[in-house]
Amino acid sequence: MSISINNFASGTAITAHAFNKDGTRVALCPNTNEVVIYRKEGNDWKLEVTLKEHDSLVTGIDWAPGTNKIVTCSQDRNAYVWTEDKDGWHPALVILRLTRGCTSVKWSPKEDKFAVGSAALAISVCYWDPEGNWWVSRLIKNLTSTALTVSWHPNNFLLAVGGTDSQVTVYSAFVKNIDNSKVASAGTAFGKFSPKEAVGMVMATFKSSGWITGISFSPSGNQCAWVSRSSTIEFLHCETPDLKTQVIKLRGLPLSSLFWANETTVLAGGHDCTPVLFQGSPLNYNYVRDLDAGESATLNKANSSAKAVFEKKTNLGLDSNEDNDTSLPTKHQNRIIEIIRHSPTSFSTVGCDGNQIIWPFSAVNLKV
């Protein structure tokens, strides 16, 4: 299979995206208050439907593979759970109780809860209330900054959060009558807690050197990794209570997003406009290579060009439709906003250039 480039948002950015279970449909936000869904037909993607309910920019989308429900969040301080039937997609408003805009959203592994990060110094842990027949929330309060990114532990009741306070915090997100109290009472590598303490208990905190823009637990939950604005990626070994970390300083610009391809492989993307590969073992990870570059000369040119774009944007304030004679050798012509898994054998990226790109592992010589 070859790399597939899809310009879904020409002239603007794609702020978030998510795939259905088999990767044949994608929901994405073209830097607006709308979510558009495309369906794969042959070699082409056809517009299927546009979801219109939010009033401001959509900042997070997640598609539950088991229930086929989509959850979206926005700067309008709202989240919606979208359910599909023969008549189309129907939104259900979530009672978030947040006073500032939302930044990210993720379904829990069992798809019975989801977490919404926000600028309100709080995180909403949301679940279905059958008595009220609506989505309600419990708040993790007293954060010290905006929560930019969240990741669920596979056990379904621990939540890792990264934000603008340059630290990662692992919270209890246990919800009574939703989670298994016996499993929770047995304890974790982050310590023991009583389910009575429920949502919001701080299990561990890890200081970093910059804003945390992406975070993810490994499939087993024994490791966690995050990227920051300080051009670093950090790996946490959380199989035992020692909770040791490894920091890798990057040679280029900061990364924005990451995910675990397996227990020993992390893929990330950011301001250098190329997916980046890290591999190793607990506390012994290494930068391997950029996945969208050729010879070393091309690599140097790519880094130089990416920095030129970055400086022009920040120093001169140029918009994407203004004069910009810099052309990058990478497939993305602007920073990668999000990188996620597309299928067991491929991953997907979206960026500020309006492109969504599907990368088969085989096409970038990656064995996972």
Image (cartoon, rainbow, N blue to C red):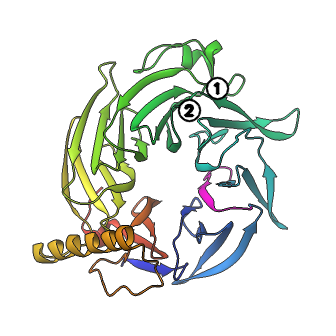
Quickly name the residue at label 2.
156
Residue shown at the point (65%, 13%) measured from the top left:
196
Does 57 lie within the magenta span? yes
Q: Is residue 365 left or right of residue 113?
A: left
Residue 177 lies, with reference to residue 301, above or below; the image says: above
Seen as rendered, the residue at the extreme right is 132
Residue 289 lies, with reference to residue 319, above or below; the image says: above
Residue shown at the point (25%, 76%) measured from the top left:
305
**In this orientation, which residue lies closer to the viewer: 101 or 30?**
101
Q: Are marks 1 and 2 in contact (CB under 8 Å)?
A: yes
Q: Identify the magenta region.
A: 55-68
Q: Is residue 278 left or right of residue 12?
A: left
Question: In terms of sequence position, does the residue under pointer 1 or pointer 2 come before the other?
Answer: 2
Quickly name the residue at label 1.
179
Q: Quadrant of the N terminus?
A: bottom left
Image position, residue 252 (x, y; %): 22, 60
The amino acid pointed to by label 1 is Asp
Image position, residue 297 (x, y; %): 11, 76
Real-space CA distance between mark 1 and mark 2, rounded to the nearest whole angstrom: 7 Å
Image position, residue 327 (x, y; %): 30, 84
Image-quadrant location for residue 166: top left
Q: Is residue 230 left or right of residue 147?
A: left
Seen as rendered, the residue at the extreme front is 316
Residue 170 lies, with reference to residue 30, above or below; the image says: above
The amino acid pointed to by label 2 is Asn
Q: Quadrant of the C terminus?
A: bottom left
Q: Which label belongs to residue 95?
A: none
Image position, residue 53 (x, y; %): 77, 62
**In this orientation, which residue lies closer to the viewer: 6 or 21?**
6
Q: Is residue 289 left or right of residue 200?
A: left
